[in-house]
Amino acid sequence: MGTPRRDPKGVSQPQDLGAPRPSFRPVVMSFVHAMEGLSYVYLTQRNMRIHVSMATLVGAACIFLGVGRLEVLMVVLATAGVLVAEVVNTLTESMVDILEPRYHPAAKVVKDVAAAGVLIASVFAAFIGVVAFFPALLDFPERLRSLLRERLALFIAYTCVVVVPSLVGLFFVEFRFPKGRLPGCFEAGDKEGT
């Protein structure tokens, strides 16, 4: 069996000389931490809440207009690009606030460039949306009849399960936690615990 070893938490564990047993705990914890990060970005960044709400509305438009798979894929990739850009922007702003809590011209440049990345992603997403939806809008009367015949139940379910909660979340968080201030969170320059 071997000599006992200590893990980082100080608990003595017997050393296993055989093949390592797979542990799913680190994988699960990775997802938990990622969800905590997404929650933080959603709850503290108004633009992220707006992007998520717009993404759900664009999804509803895809169902409403009955766009094809390729167009849906284009829209999903563009939307994902905007959301990832917003996450990177939040990360960049947080890191700059940690490294330079006071105003500094270089810190402003870094934050502005990160925000420019979100702007570029958003402009391209809007362009992709126009390309994806334009043919469907040209044939709007037929698309509307097709919605009523084939996709109305899906559209209503999507609206109730996805769109309405995202819009409620957008306004609830805004009024409940103004300026992104969450209980237990502190900004750069604040003293921890105050």
Image: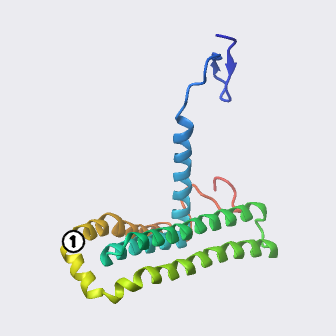
Locate residue 183, reporting x and y percent.
Answer: 54, 57
Closer to us: 131 or 88: 131
In the image, what residue occupies the spot 71% across and 75% down? Answer: 113
Q: Is residue 43 left or right of residue 9?
A: left
- Identify the amino acid type marked 1: Glu
Q: Position of residue 62 (x, y in %)?
A: 36, 74
Q: Secondary structure at mark 1?
A: helix
Q: Can residue 144 be seen at all in this image of the molecule? A: yes
Tell me: 39 left or right of 194: left
The extreme left residue here reads 149
Q: Residue furthest top?
A: 1
In depth, the one of 146 and 174 nearer the eye is 146
Q: Is residue 178 visible?
A: no
The residue labelled by disc 1 is 150
Q: Residue at x 65, y 17 (%)?
A: 15
Q: Nearer the viewer, residue 149 or 113?
A: 149
**Which quadrant does the N terminus fall into?**
top right
Residue at 75% x, 71% y: name it: 110
- The residue shown at (38%, 85%) is 135
Residue 108 vs 17, above or below: the answer is below
Q: Is residue 140 above or below residue 42?
A: below
Residue 118 x, y percent position in the rendering: 61, 74
Q: Position of residue 142 (x, y in %)?
A: 25, 84
* Quadrant position of residue 112: bottom right
Q: Quadrant of the C terminus?
A: bottom right
The answer to whether residue 157 is left or right of residue 101 is left
Q: Quadrant of residue 189?
A: bottom right
Question: Label 1: how many residues lie within 10 Å, few (<14), some (14-19) or many (20+)?
Answer: few
Residue situated furthest bottom in the rendering: 138
